[in-house]
Structure formats: structure tokens, C-alpha cells
Image: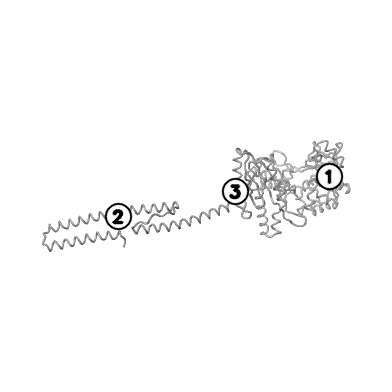
Amino acid sequence: MSLLRTILLGITAVTVLLLIGSQALGIQMGASGSERLLLALTIAAAGLCAAAGAIVLLRWLDRRMLAELSRGLRALDSGDGAQAALPAVREFAEVQDALAQARERFRATAEENIARIESMQLELNLDAVTRLPNRRYFHNELRRALTQARSVGAGHVLMFRQRDLIEINRHMPREYADQWLRSLAHRLDQLLGRRHDPPYLLARLNGSDFALLLPATAPAQASQAGEKLRLELRALRLALGEQRWCRWALALAQYGPEDQASDLLARLDHALMRAESSDGDAIEHADDEYRGDSAGEHQWRDTLVAGLDQHRFSLDVQGLLGPGAALLRNEATLVLHDAEAPAPIPASRFMPPAVRLGLSAECDIQAVRLGLDWLVSHQGQLAIRLAQASLAQSNFLPRLGQLLRDRPAQTARQILEIDAHGLADNYAAVRTLCEVATDAGARVGVRRLSQDFSALTRLHQLPISYVKVGGDFVSGLTNSPGGRHLAASVIDTARQLKIDAYAEDIPDQTTEVLLRDLGIIPTRNDAAGMEA
């Protein structure tokens, strides 16, 4: 029995015994009724005083109990592990023991919950395979960088895409592909990640897309980092078969305080699509002309499908002039007319999303059909550019062959141009194209040879009519002995194969004279141009 109950029962028992004893004593002594009444009242008063004292004692004990309980609960809430000395009253000891046990359980539960929350935060912000920050985390950091750009200065974002991830997963065990991505991410993070000052942020946005956030960087710094990344990605490529390697597309954009995250990412995505359509690994720069254009793949699909269904395409035809302003041939690029666009959309803008969406073959068929129509009412030859992605679609070459064979008179003056990298990356498809074209009476030319000189080793195997060089190779020719040596190799190969070699993007008269001395025909476009 507890101390408190003992006190109360003791006081009650003593009072009852005194009352009974007083009555018995009064009877034995022959006391009168009034005397016995007085004695009983005295003893009852003493009992009431004792009871009042017990009540006061109980209230004091209650207050003490509540104080101890409150102190224990505050210690439990604050996580304070210090325990007060145990009180002498046993009830207090039991409460203190219960609080101590609750405190230990609370601490263990809190530590477990904290660990679980930290794990969930990591899972929420990290990619499961590469352990790089994921899209959500990158977007938050990008918005923070755009906010800080006004105070710390402009920065850059470099996005890169693994173009053959589906094929990698199809031909290799998933565990092997994941291990390759994990090691690649670790290597790139060590090379260009958070150790940089200011820290760069490398993230994986989705299965094939990665991004590198370069805050407070000048264009030269960003270009240097991009080139380092490009070379590292090339060194870490996977082999996909005989003389085939997985490919990367890279795009770089500068941002400032006036930019919005959605517009910036849209410009980068469009630059990535252009990089994919070029089939090289050169870094594509996001153009300011697309600032504010956030059209996504769904919008492009709707626009292109409507254009194909309603025949909203035309050709922008320009004459290619040689020495003495003589017309060598005409060259055409496809133009899309969209009712919602303020001006016709050039192929350089809509073909990258067309390649991404698998619609490049339809666009190229439109271009060839329009080219044949143009040749009905115009003299001379007409060159039409074909996308490498179109050759990879199984139904494109049969449809192209039928289209050319149906109009032999115009096909004899039709030239189909392909990029040089196709000879190295997809030689079988290019060879089939050459067979289809020559059988129908058309010719095939190779453009942008200076971006992939390895195509020279394939020229003798194909019926190619001419090759074209241009870009930085031609513009830097006068100051580059190595470039002049390569140019000499090009013209030697062309002479042996009895094909023409043309140069475009000629910057000045000195370069033009040098090209003539080497035997390469300098060309320029007729600014007038025609539309069909």
C-alpha cells in the first residue's frame, strides 16, 4: 500500500477509534449526555483538523507530482538525457522510471525517423543509377542560379544526350549499361563536378539526358569546360558493332538574369536536336533567335504533321556560283509555312525536331518531290539535301527510288546531297542510296567533308559526283599548314576518282586564291534566290 493511502487510512481509523473509545469511556465513567457530546465533538474536531492537514499534504504532493512530471516531459521533448535525482516518494520514482523509458524510446524512434527522412531526401534528389542529382534538384539549382545571376554574373548550361541508349540497352545486359553510366558519371563528376570553384553541378535529367550547370562563368571558360567534356565523352564511348561507337549530342547556352528556366531549357533542347541532326559531336550553341520559343516535341509534331498533310512546304532555291560568277547548279532547302508562325520556318529550325520525331523521311520526300516539280519549269541542275536519319528508315529509299524513276527527265538533273559523316557511320545505307539514285539517273554529292575526313577512305567505293569542304576548315586555311596538307589530300583523292572538289564559306580573296592554287573550286551562293 502506498504512503499516501496509508496516511489517509490511518487518520480515518484513528478518528473512528477515538469516537468509539470516547463513547465507551463516557459510559463507564457515568458521564452525562452533555459531557459525552462535548467529548465527541472535541475528538471530531481533532479528526477534522487531521483530515484538513491530510488534504493539504495531498495537494502539496499533487503539485510536486505535476512539477516532476512536467520537468520530465520537457526533458523528453528537448532530448536532454540528464536525469534528476530520484525523489524519496515511491510514486515519483515510478513516474521518473516511466519517463526515462519513454525518453529512450523517443530518442530511438527520432533517430530512426531522421535517418529515414535523410534517405528519402537522397532518393528524392538523386538519380537511382548514377547517384547524380536528378531533374528536380537540377531545376531548383538552375532557378537559384538565374536569381543570383544579377549579383554574381552570367553563367552557362551544357546539356548532353546519349543518342544510342536504347540500342545499348537492347544489345547489352542492363546491369552492364548501368555500370557504364555509373562509372561515366563518377568520372565526369570528378573532372567537372563540385570540386570546381565555383562548384559546377552535374546532373542526370532523364535516361539519356545530362546537364552541367556552370554558374558565373565567362564564354571562354564554358567553351573550355565543354571541350573537356566532349573529349572525355568520346574517350568513354561504348562500341556498338564493327566500326560503330555510341554517339553523344552536346549543346551549350549562356544565361543571364533576364532568362527564364523554361525558355533556357527549350533553347538547349532545340540545340540538342540540331546536334543530333548533324550527327557529329561538336558542341551546338543555343541561338538567341529561339529565345522565348518554348515549343516542345508535341507542338512540333502537330506543326509538322499538319504541314505534311496540307502540303505547306516549299523550296528556297539559290544558285551556286563558281569562278567568274558562272552558275554551277542550284541548291534548295525546304521551308515550312505555318499559319501561326510570323514567317516561313527554315529547315535548320524544323528538321532537328523532325529527326527526333522520326518525320525526317517524310520531309525529305517532300523536298525531292518539290525539287522534281521545280526542274519541270527551270533549267540547270538542282541539289537537295537529305538527312542521315532518313536513310535509316526502312521505307525511305524504296519510296525515293520510285519517285525518281517516275520522272526520269527531271531525275537526270537531280542531285542528292548527304553529309560526309554518313559514309563512316552508316556506310551501308549510303551505298544503297547511291545505288537507288544512279539506277534512276540521279547523282549523289557529299557535303561537309571537312567535318569528317575519314569519309575520304570510302569515296572510291561509291559513285560520288563531288565533295564539298567549308566552315572553319576553309576559313582558317591560310594560317594552317596542316589544313593545307589536308586540302591537298582531298584534291589528290578527287583527281584520282575524277570527281570535283568545291569549297564554300570562303572568307576573303586570299583564301579564294589559295583554293584555286590547290585545285579546289571556290563557290558562293547567289544572294537573289528563288522560291518554289
| Residue nearer the viewer, 391 or 439 | 391
Is 328 in front, or is 188? 188
The answer to whether the residues at label 2 and label 1 have Cβ atoms under 8 Å apart is: no
> From the viewer's perspective, is the residue at label 3 or at label 1 nearer?
1
Circle 1: element type: helix
Q: CA distance from mark 3 to mark 2?
A: 61 Å
Q: Which residue is mark 3?
A: 137
Determine if residue 405 is in view: no
Residue for badge 2: 58
Give the residue displayed 46% in from the left and 56% down from the top: 106
Query: For the residue labelled by badge 3, is the local secondary structure a helix, a strand or a loop?
Result: helix
Residue 485 numbered tag: 1
The amino acid type found where label 2 is placed reads Leu
CB-based contact (under 8 Å), mark 3 and mark 1: no
| Quarter of image, res 327 | top right
| Residue 227 can be seen, yes or no | yes
**Upstream in sequence: badge 2 or badge 1:** 2
> What percent of the width, then of the height, locates residue 444?
83, 48
Q: CA distance from mark 2 to mark 1?
A: 108 Å
